[in-house]
Every structure is written in C-alpha cells, then in structure tokens.
Image (cartoon, rainbow, N blue to C red):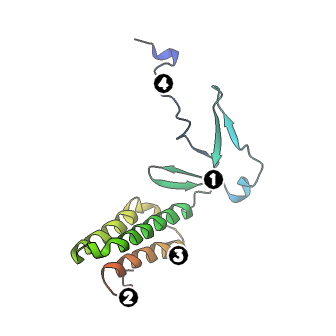
Amino acid sequence: MRSRLDGSSRQKLNEDKTQIIWLGTWHQLNKTLPQTLTLQNGTVLQFSIAVKNLGILINSQLTKVDHIAAICRSGFFQLRQLRSIRQSLTPAAVKTLVPAFISSRLDYCNQLFVGVTGRLLDKLQSLQNAGARKFDRITPVIS
C-alpha cells in the first residue's frame, strides 16, 4: 500500500473536463489577464468565458444570462422535437410530456433566478407560455 504522502493516491486532473474562469466586474475583466494557466506537471489550461458546474452555466461576471439562454434553448428544442412527433402521441401524452419537459428545466436550481432582471424573466416566461400553448390552445395565462 502506498503512502498518501507521496501523492500517488491523489486524484488526477482530467484535462478534457477541467474548466477555469476569471471572475470579476466588466472593468476588471477588460484588463490584460493571462489566457492560460500552466500547472507544475506541464498541463496548460485555457480560461473560459463561461463554465458549467452541476448543470449551471456560470459566466465571468456571475450573471445568469448564459444559464437562462441555455435553459430557453433546450426548452424550445424539446418543444420542436415534440411538435414533430405530436401526431404519434395521444392528447393525454402531450399534456403530460410538455409540462414535464418545460417545468423540469425551469425548476432545476430555480433559486438562481431570484433577483434576475425582468428581461431575463421574460425569456423564461416565454418558454413557459410556449409550453402552455402546445398542450392547450389558450392565450398565455401563466404569470
């Protein structure tokens, strides 16, 4: 059995999955910052504009713009996919699938949406309204 002191039992860095990011204000990030980080073992890591952790996109200014855009993109993609197979589904299945797809995207880590701007909330609301229209021919009533 190897000793923990020699470093052999430590976890190794997966270069393909490791993301690093500079965090700061717009003014701070406009300063000349290194674009790469070289580790002691010679591994070179590139700094990212946004990183993903537990399914949440975090950008360098800690705004939720990228995360909300990703939610809307995936939600509208799912609605388009369901539209293409809708004729193969029963109305009950559509009424079950659409809210499940949309609400699962909106509910995951929804605590992050506290304090976001009205413009960003409107994007989420448009996704929710589009889902409501898919399974029930009504005007947007979800608020």
When the figure is inspected, residue 48 is found, relative to residue 43, above or below; the finding is below
Q: Which residue is mark 3?
A: 118
The residues tagged by marks 1 and 3 sit, at their Cα atoms, a distance apart of 24 Å
Q: Quadrant of the N terminus?
A: top left
When the figure is inspected, residue 18 is found, relative to residue 94, above or below; the finding is above
* Residue drawn at 56 percent across, 36 percent down: 15
Q: Classify mark 2: residues with Cα within 10 Å, few (<14), some (14-19) or many (20+).
A: few
The residues tagged by marks 4 and 3 sit, at their Cα atoms, a distance apart of 45 Å
Image mark for residue 15: none
Q: Answer with mark 2 or mark 1, whichever residue precedes in sequence.
A: 1
Q: Amino acid at mark 3?
A: Gly
Please tell me whether mark 2 or mark 3 is closer to you in this view.
2
Q: Which residue is mark 4?
A: 10
Q: Amino acid at mark 2?
A: Thr
- Tell me if label 4 and label 3 are in contact, CB under 8 Å: no
Q: Quadrant of residue 3?
A: top left
Please tell me whether mark 4 or mark 3 is closer to you in this view.
4
Res 114 visible = no
Q: Position of residue 125 (x, y in %)?
A: 44, 76
The kind of secondary structure element at disc 1 is: loop
Please tell me whether mark 1 or mark 3 is closer to you in this view.
1
